[in-house]
Every structure is written in structure tokens, then in C-alpha cells.
Image (cartoon, rainbow, N blue to C red):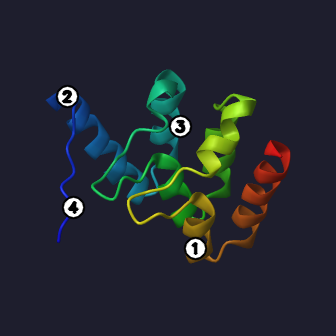
Amino acid sequence: MAKEVALDINGENVKEMRETYVKALGNEWESIKTLYQTKRFALSYHLNPSEDAVFHIAAYKGSVDLLRVLFDMVAGPRKWDVLTMKNIQGNTLLHEVAVSKNVEAANFLVEIAHEGC
């Protein structure tokens, strides 16, 4: 049975999230950085029906530089929450970074986890 995903946001936000998702998939990291520097409240917004936030996509792509920039935007106590944030499949950032096979990105997430303990 397919799971229905409801979005309780206005059309402008949906358009912006879709554009952000496309930019993330296209490795347009500078655009992503600029967007979230002005809209930090949106860092945990779901960008697709899989409920991936920008952190999931950066981890999946193995972009350690973007992960560093994004985590710098998160207050210390919230970093653990972001690190353990799950998408609809139950994947955390560490699950996603494993797919990328980027050891540097995986080590960075482990460092964040260590800081959060």
C-alpha cells in the first residue's frame, strides 16, 4: 500500500522546495548554501516525497563540504537531532552517506555524532 504524503504549505513553498531539490541533485551547492544561509528555518524541510531534507541529499551525494556548511548553520544541541533525522525509508544521514561511499563525509558525520554525545 502506498503511503500518502500530505504537504501543509503554500504553493510558493512547494515550488521553492522543488527548485532546491533539483539544485541539490545537480550539485549546485553554492545556490543551496545561499538559500539556507537566509532561510535556516527551512533546513529540516522535506524536499521530496521520500521526506529527504537537504542534509539527506548532501549525505547521499557524499558532499562533505556542503555537510560542513549546513551543520555550521545548526546550533550545537540540534546537531544530534539533524544527524538522527530519518526520511520516509527510515534512513538517517549515516545511511545515506554510506551509499555515497565517501569515507571523508562518513567520518565527518561520525565526528558530529561524537560531539553530540
Residue 97 lies in what quarter of the image? bottom right
How far separated are the C-alphas under marks 1 and 2?
A: 31 Å
Q: Is residue 10 above or below residue 23?
A: above
Question: In the shown orientation, is residue 1 left or right of residue 38?
Answer: left
Q: CA distance from mark 4 to mark 1?
A: 26 Å
Q: Earlier in the sequence, mark 1 or mark 2?
A: 2
- Answer left or right for 87 relative to 50: right
Of marks 2 and 4, the one in the foreground: 4
Q: Residue at x 56, y 60 (%)?
A: 92
Label drawn at residue 3: 4
The local crowd at label 2, few if under 14, some if 14 to 19, many if 20 or more residues have their Cα within 10 Å, is: few
Q: Disc 2 to disc 4, how far (Cα)?
A: 24 Å
Image point 32% across, 53% down: which residue? 22
Cα distance in 3D space between marks 1 and 3:
20 Å
Which circle marks residue 33 in the picture?
3
Extreme residue in the top direction = 38
Residue 111, position in %: x, y?
82, 54
The single residue placed furthest to the front in the displayed view is 1
Disc 1: which residue = 100
Q: Position of residue 50 (x, y in %)?
A: 33, 59
From the image, tell me which residue sits under label 2.
12
How far apart marks 4 and 3 lie (CA) works out to 31 Å
Q: Residues within 10 Å of mark 4 (few under 14, many from 20)?
A: few
* Residue 81 image point, x, y percent: 62, 42
Evaluate if marks 2 and 3 touch, with contact meaning CB atoms under 8 Å apart. Answer: no
Question: Disc 1, disc 3: CB below 8 Å?
Answer: no
